[in-house]
Amino acid sequence: MTTKRALITGITGMVGSHLADYLLENTDWEIIGMCRWRSPLDNIEHHVARINAKDRIGLLYGDLRDYHSIHDVFSRSKPDYVFHLAAQSYPKTSFESPLDTFDTNIQGTANVLEAMRKLDLKNAITHVCASSEVFGRVPKEKLPIDEECTFHPASPYAISKVGTDLIGRYYAEAYGMTVMTTRMFTHTGPRRGDVFAESTFAKQIAMIEAGMIPPVVKTGNLDSLRTFADVRDAVRAYYLLVTVNPQPGAYYNIGGSYTCSVGDMLKTLIAMSTVKDIKVETDPDRLRPIDADLQVPNTAKFKSHTGWEPQIPFEKTMRDLLEYWRERVKSGQNFLTR
C-alpha cells in the first residue's frame, strides 16, 4: 500500500507545528510542510534532524501570494491530504495592513485550491482553516454560536476569513472537490505567537519573573468573553476532520469547553506566577478599533460527526504556555515588550 502524504501550509506556525507533531506520532504518513524561505523554523526545530535526513518530513518553499510557487508546491508534493493553515493570522495587525491580509488569506486560499484543481488533485481531502472571527459581533441571544449564525466580521482579518470560508465551500460545490472548512474558536498553548493576548500575558509574566521588566502586565480589552481550547486538542480535531467520513463542502465550528473573560484568563496566569502583587495596566495601543467580544461556540455538529471531545484542561494549557515562555526567556534571547 502506498504511504499517504499530507501537505501542511504554514507548518512553521503554532498550529502547523503541533499538527506535524501529531501526524508524525499517530500516523505513518509522509509530511510535507510549506513555508516561505524566510519563515522562522523555531517551532519545528525539534524536527530539523528528521527533515535533513528526509525521514518522513520535508519542506517546500511557497508563498500564498505567488500562484506559480503554490502550483509548484502541489505539483511536486501531490498530497492525499491538505491542511491549509497558512495565513496572516493576527486581527490587530489587519487594521494596519488590510490589503496584505486580504491578499494573503483570500487570494492565497484561491491560489491553493485553483492549483489543486488545475493539477487534477480534486480527490485530495482538504481542510481550509477559516476562523471563529467570521462571526464577529454576535448578540447574546445567539450564544452559543452555531454554524448558521450570521457573519458580522469585526476586523479586516475576520473579513478575510469570511472570504477564506466561502472560497473553500465554493470549490467543493463548483468543482466536486473534497474541501471542508472549520471555524476554530480561541486555541492556544506552547508556541503561541506573542501578539495574541494570552501569550503576551504569559511572556510578560515570564519576563517579570526574570527581572527583565517591572511587575506590570500591559493589556488590551479584558472584558471579551472567550472559550479556550488547547492547540493539541485542535490538531487532533483537524486529523479527525479529514479521516472520519469527510463530507465535501461541510463546515464546522470547533472549540474548547472552558469559557471565561480575557481578564479571568489573565488572573489564572498571574496566580501561577512566582512573583506576587503583579499589577495590570491597560495599554491603549493594545485595543482594537472594534472587537469580537462574545466568542462562545456550539460544537455539537462536529462532535456528532467525528466523536471529538477536548481533553486538555484549561489550567494545563495556561501552565504549559507559561512554561514555554519561561524556557524562552531563560534562553537569553531579547524580546520586544509587545
Image: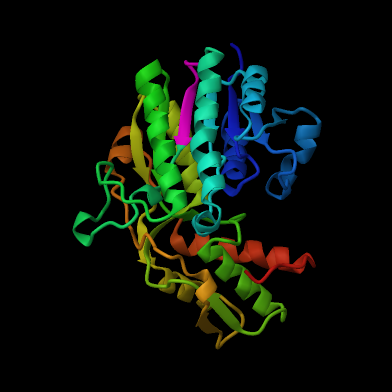
| Image quadrant containing the N terminus | top right
Numbered disc total: 0
Q: Residue at x 32, y 40 (%)?
A: 303
Q: Residue at x 50, y 25 (%)?
A: 113
* Residue 311 at least partly seen: no
Q: Furthest-front residue in view?
A: 99
Q: Residue at x 42, y 26 (%)?
A: 179
Residue 133, position in %: x, y? 40, 51
In the rendered view, does 133 fall on the left or right side of 279? Answer: left
In the rendered view, does 64 fall on the left or right side of 170? Answer: right
Q: Quadrant of residue 19?
A: top right
Q: Which residues are magenta?
A: 121-128
Residue 217, position in %: x, y? 56, 78
Residue 327, position in %: x, y? 70, 64
Q: Is residue 103 found inside the magenta-colored segment of the image?
A: no
Q: Nearer the viewer, residue 272 or 335?
A: 335
| Image quadrant containing the C terminus | bottom right
Asked which colour scheme the image uses, the reply is: rainbow
Please say if 23 is above or below 263. Answer: above
* Residue 201 at least partly seen: yes
